[in-house]
Image (cartoon, grey):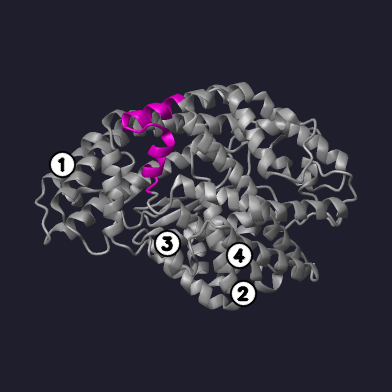
Amino acid sequence: MLNTLPQTAQEFMNWDWPQIEPLYRDLETRELTAATVNDWLADWSRLSDFIGEAVARLHIATTVDTTDTAAQERFHTYLETVIEPVEQAEQKLREKLLATGLQPEGFAIPLRNMRAAAELFRDANVPLFTQEQKLSNEYDKIVAAQTVEWEGQEVTLPQLRPVYQDADRGKRERAWWLATNRWLHDRAALNDLWRQFMDLRRRIARNAGFENFRDFRWKQFGRFDYTPQDCETFHAAIEQVVVPAAVRIYERRRRQLALDTLRPWDTDVDPLHRPPLRPFKDVADLDEKAEAIFRQVDPQLGDYFGIMRREKLLDLDNRKGKAPGGYQQDLPASKRPFIFMNAVGLHDDVQTLLHEGGHAFHCFESAGLPYTQQRSYSPEIAEVASMSMELLAAPYLTTEHGGYYTPAEAARARIEHLESMILFWPYMAVVDAFQHWVYTHHDEATEPDNCDWKWDELWARFMQGVDWNGLDDARKTGWQRKLHIFQIPFYYVDYGLAQVGAAQVWRNALRDQAGAVRQYRYALSLGGTRTLPELYAAAGAKFAFDAATLGELVSLIETTIGDLETVS
């Protein structure tokens, strides 16, 4: 019956549930045996891929223009009228396969994940997930509407980012306050949204039989290879070996800038008073040079990115009304990725594109796996794909390789990136520890003032070296400015763990770049068919939380920074 599917996912987007339902009923009623299971899984995957791409494209449309109310309505209607019954139909197929006891080849990990999903499923939660997505869209709309007047022009807050690199300290401070006050203007609206998220997530967890949303989320994410207690070990390791390294970076910056104390508006300006790096003139220049860099890393990766450019699968520039942040979205029926970001002309934009490019390559490399369940991989290994690419691409940032910089500028950019790795781990610990507290202290955390207090406490523990004296409201409301806390709870630790893996891939590349790239591509090609420690091992890394591993990587980063300083 699946031969009635249209040729493209774009056509399928116009199908409603009465057209789709017979396809699920056909799969549900078919005989399922060892002889038929592979064809059955292939048909299920094809249908799931069409639905997955339809919802992805509809979601993308809500982010490229948050003012497009028609796109918002189409997306919400699809969630309510198609995705909600699809979730119930998918549950029946999971139960059907699990009941057979069949073990298709290469399907052990997908079966494990499927078992967890089947155990979590509750009919009552299906409409709640739709409501959660609507609240997530509301966060995007609030943030996307944030503009200020700067030097006679209306600009978005991301468009102020280049000003933070200006040599004029007074100008930096004015821009910082302008952005901060714009965020504080939305404080009440974000607080109200937060209360709605908290109520909804408690109901979701309780419907599924969990005491708190953290335990529900752990199982929903399929975190079989580590526990919340491992995260606490990771936080402690960061406090022990990374926080002192971050303080060393901030102190060096303070001395170079000849300041009594380092303030938040002093953290992006070049400490040696050099003009800011301006790596590209427009997004066409940005993606053309990115393709050249990817070809240096590996010709096949360059070809992948070339496909994305030709097929217009990139939306890179910042503009009013565009949702915040950046992401890569799989289009599973087309076996293509889509990259969304907000470039404003900084080196951070280069890093973001390299990062999202790594995600895109994961999509391409795993596309050969036959079943959609095999192509579903955990966020931790997904972020190894992206963060490793930032580091694997680093040797090719120069114009000699088709990139953006002179050798001195490239060294400076690499120092900036390596320092950001050290500075990121403590911030990640704040975000992750905050979320552990939130969802194990639900009644307290529903009140935003208590969230402000907890964020402030964690900030003092991990974020040392920058003087926030007198900036209390800005500091303690920082949790409102992290979209993951609102939209993707508990995702953020994945970046921290992935950076441990990526730093090990980079360590291997310092010895053998080509060999490290081969291992990297092999790990990506495995999709979700191995455990997390096995996927890390395939990439040439160890899945670890301990201070010893982290300390070794911090030492390598600091040593490399010292070497690069002789070139920059």
- Among numbered discs 2 and 4, the one appearing first in the sequence: 4
In the image, residue 89 above or below residue 201: below
- Cα–Cα gap, marks 4 and 1: 47 Å
Q: Element under label 4?
A: helix
Q: Please state which of the two labelled residues, at mark 1 or mark 3, is closer to the viewer.
A: 3
> Residue at left 63%, top 25%?
186
> Residue at left 89%, top 46%?
259
Q: Position of residue 225 (x, y in %)?
A: 40, 54
Q: Please state which of the two labelled residues, at mark 2 or mark 3, is closer to the viewer.
A: 3
Is residue 474 in view?
yes
Q: Is residue 335 magenta?
A: no
Name which residue type carries label 1.
Arg
Say which mark, if any, is on residue 391: 4
Task: Name the residue beneath numbered marker 2.
Answer: 510
- Cα–Cα gap, marks 2 and 3: 22 Å
Magenta range: 199-222
- Among numbered discs 1 and 3, the one appearing first in the sequence: 1
Q: Please state which of the two labelled residues, at mark 4 or mark 1, is closer to the viewer.
A: 4
Give the quadrant of the C terminus. bottom right
Q: Is residue 207 magenta?
A: yes
Name which residue type carries label 4.
Leu
Say which mark, if any, is on residue 33: none
